[in-house]
Amino acid sequence: MPSTVFNWIFLGTIVYLVFCTILIALIALYVFGASKIGCVIFYIVASILSFFSYNFGIIFDETVTKSTLETTVGEFSQYLNLNLLLWIVFNIFIALLFMFKVELQKVSFANRMVKAFKVYAGICLSLFIIGSVYYKDYASFLRNNRQFRHMVNPISPIYETGKYFKKRMFPVKNIFVQIGGDARMITESTSNKKLVILILGETARSDHFSINGYKGNETTPNLQKLDVVSLKKVVSCGTATAVSVPCMLSRMGQQAFSIDGSKAQSNLLDVAKLSGYEVSWIDNNTGCQGVCDRVNVVDLNPYKNDKDCTSTTCYDEILVSALKDQLRPEKNQLIVLHTLGSHGPSYYLRYPKAFAKFKPSCETSELSNCTKEEVINTYDNSLLYTDYIVSKIINYVDETDSREKTVVYISDHGESLGENGVYLHSLPYVIAPKEQKHVPFIFWFDQKTAEKNRKKIDNLRKFQLCNFSHDNIFSTFLDILDISTILYEKKSDLLRLDSWRCKVDHG
Ligand SMILES: [Zn+2]
C-alpha cells in the first residue's frame, strides 16, 4: 500500500490515466455520432471480460485474446455457468436502460469537433502536469509492470481483437524457410526400426504429480510402477497452449520465440519427416497451432463413440484407440498425441466417473463456488486419468510393438488452482506464478533402447533435480530420433549434458 500522500496521489493518477484512455476512445466515437452505441458496446464488453478477470485472474493480452477468439464451441461452453449468464443479463439490462433512458443533445458535427478538441486539450494538459510531477515514478512503474496496459478493460481486448483480425485479413507473408535440410538418420537400419511417441500434456503442473514428490492425492500410481525418468524442475516456454506448443517443437528457444517466426521455419516434426520418419499428429485438443501443417494429421471422427465422447469433447482415451491404428512396425515413426489433459475450468469433464477418486470434487466450471479442497481434488482426478492414459500407452506399445521404443510425456504449461486468488493459466509470463510454468517431463524407454543407451539414460536420471525448460526438447528429441543435423546442440541435449550444466537455483 502507498505510504505517503505523494504515492497515494500517484495511485490516483493511474486510475485517472485509465479513465482518460477510455474517454479518448469514447470521444472519438462521439465526434462521429456514435457515442451512445459506443458506450453500450464498451460497457457490455467490459462487464463480460471483467467477470473472467475477477473470477479467474485472466488478463486479456495478445495471447489470451487469440486463444479466446480461436476457442472451440465445446471449450467455450464449459465457461458458461449460471453466474456468468446472470452477470451478462444484468449488465445488458443496465446498458439497455442507458440506451433508452438517456437522451443526448443533438449537436452539429462542427460543434462536436470543437467540444472534442476542448476535452482532448484538457486531457493533454492534465497528462503533461502528471508527467512532469511523476515522470520518474511512471518510468519505473511501466518498466516493471509491462502487463499493465493489458488490464485497461475494454480498450486492450478491443485493440488486441482488432490486431488479431487485421493479421487474419492481411497476413504478413512470411517466406517459409526450411531449416535442417541436412537432417539424416545416423544409423538407418532395416532391422531396428524406431517408434517415438510424444504425448503433449495439457495444463498439468509438475508439483501435483506424486512421482515428483506431491504429498497430496496419489495422482501417478501407474507411472510410479514403470521404469520412467521424471524430471522434476522443468519450466514451460509460455503459459498458454498457443505459445507453448509451437515453442516446444521449434528450434528458436524461448528467448527468440515468436508465433509468426516459428510458423516461418521448419520445426522438429518437419526435421523428423525430412530424415525419413513417418510423422503423425493425433489431436484431442483445440488443434496443433500450425506445427502439424506438413505432416500426417489423423482424423479422430471415426473413433468417436458414446463411451469416450460427449457432444462437445472426448476423453483422452480416444487417442489410445487412434494410436493403435497408426502403428506401422515396418517404419520409423514419430507420433504426437495432443491430449486435452486437465484443461479447465471444467476439470470434472476431463475424466470418466471411474476416475473420480478424490472427493469431495467440484462439479462445476464456477471454481470460485467450490472450496480449495474440491478444486484440487477435481484437478487431481484429471491427473490420475492422465497417469492412466500415459501408462496405458506405454504398456500397450511395450507389449505389442517390436521396435525400439521411446515414450515422452511433457505438459505445455501448468495451472493456478486458487493460489493468491488466481485460477487457470495464460497470465503474462513475467508475472505468472510458478504453478503456471512448472511442468512434468517424463521419459520411458523400452528394454532394447535402454540397453543400447544405458549411459545416456543414466545421465538423464542423474539430472532429475536440475533446472530445465522446453528449450531442451528440440535437441533431446534429435538424439532420441537418432538424427544428425547442424541444428543439433549438445548443450541442450538432456541425454548428453555435461554435469556442470545442472543448475538448481529456481524453486
Ligand atoms: Zn494448454
Image: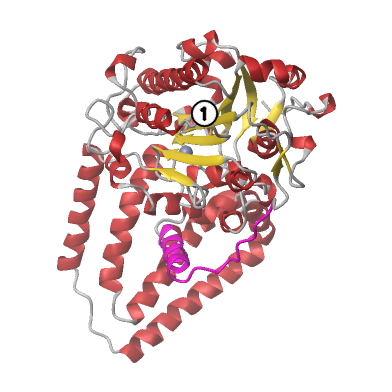
Drawn side of residue 252 relative to residue 64, left or right: right
Drawn side of residue 254 relative to residue 147, left or right: right
**Residue 356, percent from left and from top:** 32, 16
Q: Is residue 25 above or below residue 373?
A: below
- Looking at the rendered structure, the kind of residue marked 1 is Pro
> Which residue lies under the disc numbered 1?
329
Q: Which residues are magenta?
A: 157-179
Comparing 107 with 301, the one in front is: 301
Q: Is residue 241 above or below residue 177?
A: above
Report if residue 161 lies within the magenta region: yes
How many labels sit on residues? 1
**Secondary structure under the numbered disc 1 in the rendered image:** loop
Report if residue 88 lies within the magenta region: no
**Residue 75, percent from left and from top:** 32, 41
Q: Residues within 10 Å of mark 1 (few under 14, many from 20)?
A: some
Drawn side of residue 193 relative to residue 216, left or right: right
Residue 313 can be seen in this image: no
What residue is shown at x 36% (from left), y 26% (from top)?
A: 317
Comparing 227 with 78, the one in front is: 227
Residue situated furthest top in the rendering: 225
Drawn side of residue 129 relative to residue 503, left or right: left
What residue is shown at x 48% (from left), y 10% (from top)?
A: 221
Residue 230 can be seen in this image: yes
Comparing 467 with 176, the one in front is: 176
Quadrant assignment, res 2: top right
Colour pattern of the rendering = secondary structure
**Residue 180, percent from left and from top:** 70, 50
**Residue 334, percent from left and from top:** 55, 36
What residue is shown at x 30% (from left), y 69% (from top)?
A: 38
What residue is shown at x 30% (from left), y 66% (from top)?
A: 39
Comparing 486 with 192, the one in front is: 192
